[in-house]
Amino acid sequence: MTREKEWIAYVNGEYVPQSEAKVSIFDHGFIWGDGVYDALCTFNGYIMELDRHIDRLFRSIQSFDLNMPLSKEECKKIIIKVAETNGAKDQYIKIIVTSGVGPLPVMDRMDCKTTVVVFSRPFFFLVDREKEHEKGIKTIITSIRRIPAQCLDPKAKNLNYANFVLAEREARHLGADMAIMLDIHGFVNEAPGYNIFVVKQGKIYTPPGENILMGITRETLLDICDKEGLDVTEARLIPHDLYTADEVFMSCSLSGVTAIAEVDGRTIGTGKPGPTTRRLGNIYIDWAKNGIHGTQFKAH
């Protein structure tokens, strides 16, 4: 961020400098984690998959029974205005909706007024860019299991991320770049903020959708695979499938495709990004930068 111009955020109907953006300490999102969010990225002046992100946000809102004061079109206009005002071609954007503030700091939502926040920041990589795209990252299967859908359905992208935070922290403590999580039955689930893919003998496998966040980048990669004639199967995977794969990679909006070079000390394939990982990663970046599935905004 430059000193010449402070970036702005949208907070409950107002566009304010980010240093002045405030939410009450009594907001249910802060004291109870009672809210949902979605995160988007812009590449070369295009907001990637804006419609899909907004559709998912509103599914999350419906799942959490939140009172959303804005329509989908109004949300899109706010996101575009924040992106255009902040100006950079490459940004990370986040929209947060909470049940807001009520008369008492209790869990009851009675008389709460919904909070809606949209902000953007200069684009950044979650893991070192060279590791993500050139070398591949080191992962461990964490001891912390993913919360089952029967308790909190991950399809609603919600503010309860302690499960992910603790898994990622364990991975960092053990010298890894990222955690891979299993579900309570021992099947491969996802990584904190990422979906998982395995390449074996020319075929691509990814965990089924019943207990994962249905990632927008995952959906885009499935579109790319369909267009490129690549065979993708949703299948239950176990750690052995990762250890013996030809390639393993992850996907998320911030990083696109991230190669995994190591899982639990086992080298995956050649220990470098494989041909399918590179191919999909390059196509994804090409789509993002050229506005395929993108919404253009006025960058400067």
Image (cartoon, rainbow, N blue to C red):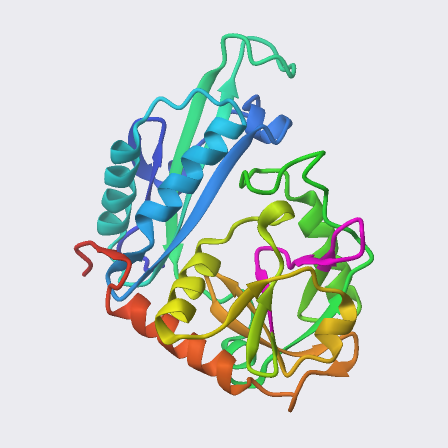
Relative to 35, residue 201 above or below: below
Instruction: From the top left corner, tell me how far across and down residue 218 is, in percent.
Output: 48, 60
Q: Residue furthest right?
A: 143
Instruction: From the top left corner, tell me how far across and down residue 85 is, in percent.
Output: 23, 48
As rendered, which of 57 and 202 lies closer to the eye?
202
The residue depicted at 80 percent of the width and 56 percent of the height is: 186
Please state if 248 lies on the left or on the right of 54 as rendered: right
Residue 256 appearing in the image: yes
Please state if 217 lies on the left or on the right of 182 as rendered: left
Instruction: From the top left corner, tell me how far across and down residue 276 is, in percent.
Output: 50, 81
As rendered, which of 176 and 120 lies closer to the eye?
176
Q: Quadrant of residue 296?
A: bottom left
Relative to 176, residue 8 above or below: above
The residue depicted at 44 percent of the width and 57 percent of the height is: 219
Relative to 36, residue 164 above or below: below
- Residue segment shown in magenta: 181-198
Q: Is residue 190 magenta?
A: yes
Residue 175 appearing in the image: no
Q: Quadrant of residue 74?
A: top left
Quadrant (top left/top right/bottom left/bottom right) for the C terminus:
bottom left
Q: Quadrant of residue 243?
A: bottom right
Instruction: From the top left corner, tell me how far across and down residue 102 is, in percent.
Output: 53, 13
